[in-house]
Image (cartoon, rainbow, N blue to C red):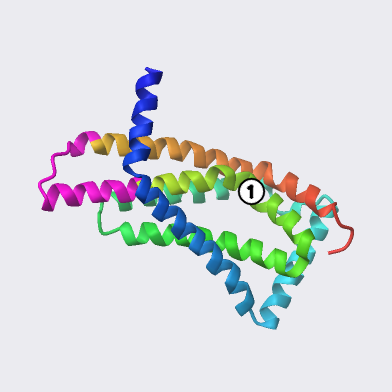
Amino acid sequence: MLTSLRQNLVAYFRVNLALYFFIILLFVVGVVFGALAVKTLGEEQKAELITYLQVFFQGLNKGQATGVDTGLVVKQAVFNNIKTVVIIWLLGITVIGVPVILFIVFTRGFVVGFTVGFLVDEYLLRGVAFAIAAVIPHNFLVLPAVIISAVSGVSFSLLIIKKRFRHHRVNLTQEFMSYTGLSFIMLLIIITGGMVEGYITPVFMKLATKLFTKV
């Protein structure tokens, strides 16, 4: 059983290796563009963001956890993550949704790049510490799940295209079940990531703010 599962996983990643390379590259490009976008901010926009962050940091230092209900944060994070996987799954079976899947991946990268880039640009090493605490914990689960979902969606769309126009011999029903099953697994992972974002990430963020006395 385990041997068969391992062989199927190896075969899956081997077949989709080029897609994984492309999707990861697209995400990295998004990160780079997000980091570069920081340099395009006007002084007024920067000032507003800095003011918000100062209030945010002060709230964490005082143990106020930004004044937002933790349960609400968890629900929102989990809902957003579920929505992302479901949307990607739906786009994967429509074929024409492939560009939107790619846009979702790029946008995820852009947000991460902008967040980290702004913190590092304004706070240097302190920004690096806080960026690691704020970005890595939940994204350790969320980003791989989004990337795997995106690759699966694009891959399934390509199978549909091959079936329609090249008379490719493939059992779409079986492939659909496999695609849906993998998406469900990614859904569970990304829900866990949402819970980490709501309960664990704030703890690391609070610890990071204690590394410096003044922001």
Q: Is residue 1 above or below residue 211?
A: above
Tell me: 138 left or right of 60: left
Q: For residue 196, what is the image quadrant?
A: top right
Which one is nearer the viewer's eye here, 112 or 88?
A: 112
User: Residue 204 at x, y = what percent?
Assistant: 74, 46
Question: In this view of the protein, which residue sits in the foreground, 206 or 20?
Answer: 20
The part of the chain drawn in magenta is 152-174
Above or below residue 131? Residue 171 is above
x and y, in percent, of residue 146 in the image: 46, 48
Confirm whether residue 71 shows in the render: no
Residue 34: quarter of image: bottom right
Quadrant (top left, top right, bottom left, bottom right) of the N terminus: top left
Q: Examine the rendered structure and indicate whether residue 39 appears above or below residue 68.
A: below
Q: Secondary structure at mark 1?
A: helix
- Which residue is outermost to the left? 167
Please state if 51 lies on the left or on the right of 100 as rendered.
right
Instruction: Estimate the x, y position of residue 61 in percent, counting from the top left.
Output: 84, 54
Q: Residue furthest bottom?
A: 43
Please rate how many residues cluster around mark 1, counting C-alpha atoms within 10 Å: few if below 14, some from 14 to 19, many from 20.
some
Identify the residue at image location x=54%, y=62%.
31
Q: Residue at x 63, y 62 (%)?
A: 115
- Residue 154 in magenta? yes
- What residue type is disc 1 on? Ile
State which quarter of the image contains the C terminus: bottom right
Is residue 35 in view?
A: yes
